[in-house]
Amino acid sequence: MDLSFFGFKEDYDNYNYSYNYNYSNDSDDTPHEASVSPHQSICLKKVFCVSLLVVSVVIFLLGLCGNILVIWISGFKMKKTVNTTWYLSLAISDFVFCAFLPFNITSMAMDEWIFGQFMCKFTPCVLFLNMFSSIFLLVVISVDRCVSVMFPVWAQNHRTVKKASIVVLMSWLLAIALSFPSVIFRDVGSHMGRTTCHNKYNSIQHSHVIVAVSRFLAGFIVPFIVIVICYSIIILRLRTNRMTKSSKPFKVMSSLVAAFFICWLPYHVFVLLELNHQNHSSVLTAGLQICTALASANSFLNPVLYVFMGNDFKQKFKSSVLSKMANAMVEEGRTTSRYLSRSSSMDGRASTHI
């Protein structure tokens, strides 16, 4: 998989020329090109590269089709609720990412970037936009569930689609802001007859470390802590109120969170390892490529989880895929509403006795 597309490489790529090759800020980025023969792709001659290419195509097809279904169901076939607002936004994020995968697939197959400087800067932003928007929405949903359990009466009176839409918009704006470094540091260069789209961090001191660490903190550590706290509170509250059966509707959300962290944790680990240039090796390069594919796979897992995490899984072959996806998305909303109604009734009886 073309690492330059995902923002891994800093002024170098995974070919056999010098690892520390740097492009000068005031040059034309084409040193000693006069006698270099045109670049020829060797990806299709390598089993590992062809395997990653096939995986990317599968992710593209499954992700595009699956997220279109989720967008259609949650956006046009279901009543608009707070829950469908969350899932619709997640599906849009994954769909946009999958829609840009053909640029990566083409670049990977050709071993070259042919789409110009604008797309070189814009396309990698989509990866990080997907990463940040997804994790921010997962955090928002976790907080929403926690508030609904801890303060059911308040949640029943104040959880509205309009407010959920505003929160989604704020999450997207924050994700866009954190994805912007790709616009600043991405650039097109040329070496040994090969045009590359790469990171160019040498313009600002320590910029590579700052970007990598900030993405790790904002895109993984802080959200992970918030989500763990929220779900711990939810589990304790459900056990306290003897409502362990009500934990079933949280399995969809729990699966989404688990899938996100399983897909993205290896990515962050290898990006941090990459900061130490001395650790650069064939193992690190292969690990980065595999982790990139794993991170991409998160974009099509959500629709799959909607299907297989719904109620009556054993009857899935007797119902349509569309019905299963709709059932999975409304499952949490129905049980949450029942929980809120029950809690409100209990609070009402308590106030009458007092």
Image (tube, rainbow, N blue to C red):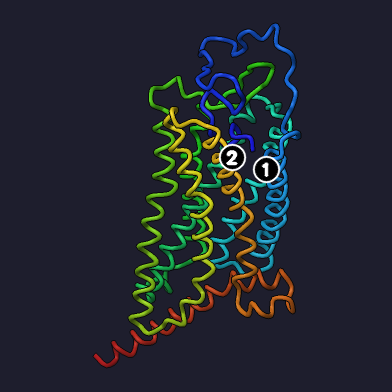
Q: Secondary structure at mark 2?
A: helix
Q: Position of residue 5 (x, y in %)?
A: 61, 34
* Residue that badge 2 annotates: 289
- Is 9 in front, or is 247? 9
Q: Which residue appears at 58% of the width and 30% of the height?
A: 121
Instruction: Report which quarter residue 110 is drawn in.
Output: top right
Q: Are marks 1 and 2 in contact (CB under 8 Å)?
A: yes
- Is 68 in front, or is 56? 56
Distance CA(mark 1)–CA(mark 2): 8 Å
- The amino acid type of the residue labelled 1 equals Leu
Q: Position of residue 46 (x, y in %)?
A: 71, 35
- The amino acid type of the residue labelled 2 equals Gln
Q: Is residue 255 left or right of residue 116?
A: left
Q: Position of residue 241 (x, y in %)?
A: 35, 83
Marker disc for residue 86:
none
Q: Secondary structure at mark 1?
A: helix
Marker disc for residue 52:
1
